[in-house]
Image (cartoon, rainbow, N blue to C red):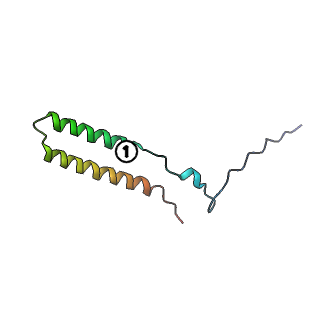
Amino acid sequence: MSTTPPEQPQRPMYGRGMNIQGTMPIPGNAELVIYLAATILIAIIALASDAVNSGAFVTAFTAITFAYLISRGIAKASRVFEQ
């Protein structure tokens, strides 16, 4: 006696056969957490140390912000679908 497997429920398909719901961004990301932690760490070092003044803080903040924006751009570019 042969048994057939139970039917699998169909997942809804949107657009050109893509599941759009699976590609929605999740609020928050690891880059944001690292960015905020690095900014807070540099601010603490700038306040506590004589070697790091406000100019060095602004330079480090600018570099970290630039790196964060580049990382988000790369992450978003990886989610672009080819037509």
12 displayed left or right of 77: right
Q: Is residue 64 left or right of residue 4?
A: left
Q: Could you tell me residue 52's position as x and y percent?
A: 13, 40
Q: Residue at x 38, y 52 (%)?
A: 72
Quick one: quadrant of the N terminus? top right
At 58% across and 55% down in the image, what residue appears?
20
* Picture coordinates of residue 39, whole percent (x, y): 27, 42
Looking at the image, which residue sits at the far left?
50
- Residue 70 vs 2, above or below: the answer is below
| Image position of 77 with respect to 35: above or below | below
In the rendered image, residue 63, in percent from the top left (x then y), is placed at: 24, 50
> What residue occupies the far right of the structure in this picture?
1
Q: Disc 1 residue type? A: Glu
Query: Nearest the camera: 54 or 23?
Result: 54
Label 1: how many Cα within 10 Å (few below 14, some 14–19, many 20+): some
Q: From the viewer's perspective, is 36 left or right of 13?
A: left
Number of marks drawn: 1
Which residue is situated farthest in the bottom direction here? 83
Q: Which residue is mark 1?
A: 31
Q: SS at mark 1?
A: helix
Q: What's the residue at 65%, 56% (across, down)?
A: 13
The part of the image, by quadrant, that contains residue 2 is: top right
Asked if residue 18 lies left or right of residue 49, the reply is: right
Specify the quadrant that holds the C terminus. bottom right
Q: Position of residue 28 (x, y in %)?
A: 43, 44
Q: Closer to the camera, 49 or 75?
A: 49
Instruction: Give residue 6's quadrant in the image.
Output: top right
